[in-house]
């Protein structure tokens, strides 16, 4: 489902950018350049050298060629605040509506709303909404095209409301990311405060490093977009699939589905010549929900590994009747003690930081009512 949201956002962004460029940004016909190009050749002397111009000076160099007009396209930068409120069943008709709600010099935010028409009742029901951030790029230079994004026209009260909601959410997410950056740099944690009561009461506890799952693959020509790199929807589909598998192994339940996404970043493009690796791990657990961090990296010339995509998926464990099912396993972070039943400490400080970031995201989501985590 997430890759379909990415496609819908890309279509809305491309229509917004290219529609304006084709209408008002087409290069004008330069008559002065044409007149110079088709003017008679200068007279030649006996030495077959061009005669000097009337000003008495020779032309020092030919005129510089004008830069090629930009060939615009769009690329996904990030996806934030994705919430799935209902499950989509087999046979349902899914509709998506993408609306550009906020624009900058090179970037734009697209609000995607997903609905379904239930197969037996034919009732339309709201399923999810997402905010996708796109950037306009010049395909000649593969860099952001400054000034290529036109302003969005707020033509209805609903568009005005979506615009201000997107602006407020962007500022709130920026503050959230700044706080998480400070948590990632911290080295001193109070485990008594960090571990919540839900995690402490779990029957079993597993170190975070034991939940890690890895995968590797290559992409092919058929999976490339117009920018000659791997389509973001293909990457997102792969990440979501492995996040769900990681959650199923941890919860020991095959009915684990995606509930939402805290954040998703596309930091660097992936090319079909790259060897792509994926790492997923469980970083936070509640009653019936858990959070899985996924990182995608590539290895290029010189053996340098570059992280290209990162995401935090929210999953929910369900029973056969699609009701939330209690997860009996938790994350172990506490130091070894003589007390029976006390979960042990994971020596890797990076795992403690990941748990702290996940707990902060959960508290932030509860405060902003983005997710109904149980």
Image (cartoon, rainbow, N blue to C red):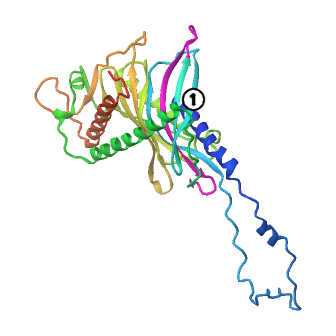
Magenta extent = 117-144
**Residue 61, position as x, y percentages in the image:** 71, 80
Figure label count: 1
Q: Is residue 360 left or right of residue 123?
A: left
Residue 280 as seen in the image, left or right of residue 19: left
Overall secondary structure of the magenta stretch? strand
- Identify which residue is drawn at 53% across, 25% down: 114
Q: Residue at x 55, y 32 (%)?
A: 156
Of the pair 117 and 357, the residue shown nearer to us: 117
Does 134 appear in magenta?
yes
Residue positioned 48% across, 25% down in the render: 128
Observer-nearest of 216 and 135? 135
The residue carrying mark 1 is: 97
Q: Residue 366 sits in which quadrant?
A: top left
Please tell me in which quadrant of the rendered image residue 324 appears.
top left
Q: Position of residue 304 (x, y in %)?
A: 45, 54
Height in image: 242 above or below 266?
above
Q: What percent of the width, then of the height, locates residue 143?
A: 56, 55
Q: Is residue 270 above or below residue 362?
A: below
């Amino acid at each position: 489902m997430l890759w379909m949201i990415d496609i819908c956002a890309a279509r809305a962004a491309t229509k917004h950018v290219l529609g304006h460029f084709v209408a008002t940004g087409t290069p004008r016909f330069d008559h002065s350049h044409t007149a110079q190009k088709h003017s008679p050749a200068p007279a030649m002397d006996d030495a077959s050298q061009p005669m000097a111009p009337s000003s008495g000076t020779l032309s020092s160099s030919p005129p510089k060629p004008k830069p090629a007009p930009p060939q615009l396209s769009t690329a996904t930068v990030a996806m934030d605040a994705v919430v799935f409120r209902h499950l989509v069943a087999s046979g349902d008709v899914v509709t998506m509506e993408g609306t550009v709600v906020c624009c900058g010099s090179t970037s734009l935010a697209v609000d995607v709303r997903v609905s379904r028409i239930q197969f037996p009742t034919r009732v339309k029901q709201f399923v999810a909404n997402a905010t996708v951030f796109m950037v306009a790029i010049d395909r000649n230079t593969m860099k952001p095209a400054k000034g290529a994004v036109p302003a969005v026209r707020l033509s209805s009260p609903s568009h005005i409301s979506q615009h201000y909601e997107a602006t407020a959410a962007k500022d709130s997410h920026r503050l959230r990311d700044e706080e998480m950056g400070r948590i990632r740099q911290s080295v001193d944690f109070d485990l008594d405060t960090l571990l919540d009561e839900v995690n402490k009461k779990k029957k079993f506890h597993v170190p975070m490093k034991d939940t890690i799952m890895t995968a590797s693959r290559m992409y092919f020509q058929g999976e490339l977009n117009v920018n000659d790199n791997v389509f973001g929807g293909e990457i997102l589909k792969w990440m979501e699939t492995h996040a769900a598998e990681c959650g199923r192994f941890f919860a020991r339940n095959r009915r684990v589905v995606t509930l939402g996404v805290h954040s998703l970043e596309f930091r660097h493009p992936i090319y079909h010549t790259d060897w792509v690796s994926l790492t997923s791990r469980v970083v936070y657990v509640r009653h019936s929900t858990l959070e899985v961090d996924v990182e995608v990296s590539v290895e290029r010339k010189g053996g340098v590994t570059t992280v290209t995509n990162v995401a935090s998926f929210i999953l929910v464990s369900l029973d056969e009747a699609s009701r939330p099912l209690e997860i009996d396993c938790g994350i172990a972070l506490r130091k070894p003690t003589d007390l029976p039943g006390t979960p042990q400490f994971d020596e890797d400080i990076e795992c403690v930081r990941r748990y702290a970031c996940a707990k902060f995201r959960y508290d932030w989501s509860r405060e902003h009512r983005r997710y109904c985590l149980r």
